[in-house]
Amino acid sequence: MILPIKDDNPTITRPWVTLSIVAINSIVFLYSYLLGTHGFDVFIQRMGLIPFEIIHAVDAVSPTSIPLYLTIFSAMFMHGGLMHLSGNLLYLWIFGNNVEESLGPFGFLCFYLLCGISATAAHVISSPNSMVPLVGASGAISGVLGAYLAAFPGARVHVLVFLIFFIQIVRVPALLVLGGWFVIQVFSATTESSGGDSGVAWYAHIVGFIVGYLLMRRRVKRLATYFQGRWEA
């Protein structure tokens, strides 16, 4: 098992959007936690995204507190537990600042939401009859990981390695960390489709990552073309 803890890729600007997303997710989780066990479950059912309801445009599980299709956005800021929240925010904290600096605050916000929507659509399409609420920022954050890989494949990432009794922090290229993460998502999705049932929206992770990677690759190419033209001029 490996766990990224930081990267050697400093930024100049303060990542206000990334910090805001971390804060909003944390506040929403704290609010839901303070509702108690029953209140937490009701909150998840009412504000989470349920694929069956989206496909059929009907409240089939629990009346939503907002217009049905707005759960596409509300679900991005909800989490099913502390470990779920902590894992997502750790990845966003490590990789989000560099992507935000590359895209600018407004561009990053649009990028984040677009990746989240794409990831959610992938989950709905892959599980159209699911009555289980989808919650979590994983799809959008997967897009951030894809973008980071596209822009900074050689950046060094500090990862904590657990191998039985061996515990060590090592520095490895982002290509290995994030590329390996993506391979695991694809393998897990394939395994689940063959009979497993982890309850994880693997296809949301996969599509979010691909969308983020492609969007950032396009921007990197545009910047390279621009600077090449300036150099030649």
Image (cartoon, rainbow, N blue to C red):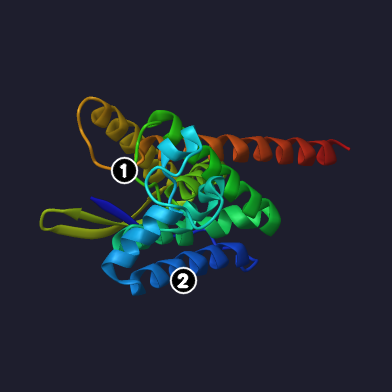
Outermost left residue: 165
Residue 27: which numbered mark, if any?
2
Q: Amino acid at mark 1?
A: Val
Q: Residue 190 at what x, y percent from top left?
A: 29, 27
Mark 2 residue element: helix
Locate residue 129: give its quadrant.
Answer: top left
Separation (CA) of disc 1 from disc 2: 23 Å
For image coordinates 25% across by 31% down, the residue present is: 192
Residue 88 is left or right of residue 192, and the answer is right
In front here: 185 or 75? 75
| Residue receiving disc 1 | 200
Residue 4 is left or right of residue 215, and the answer is left
Q: Residue 61 at what x, y percent from top left?
A: 37, 46
Mark 1 residue element: loop
For image coordinates 45% across by 29% down, the residue present is: 125
Q: Residue 197 at what x, y percent from top left?
A: 22, 37
Outermost right residue: 233
Q: Amino acid at mark 2?
A: Ile
Q: Residues within 10 Å of mark 1 (few under 14, many from 20)?
A: some
Residue 6 visible? The answer is: no
For image coordinates 56% across by 67% down, the residue present is: 20
Residue 170: which numbered mark, if any?
none
Which of marks 2 and 1 precedes in the sequence?
2
Q: Is residue 96 above or below residue 217?
A: below
In front here: 15 or 112? 112
Outermost bottom residue: 34
Q: Residue 145 at what x, y percent from top left?
A: 48, 46
For image coordinates 50% across by 58% down, the residue present is: 65
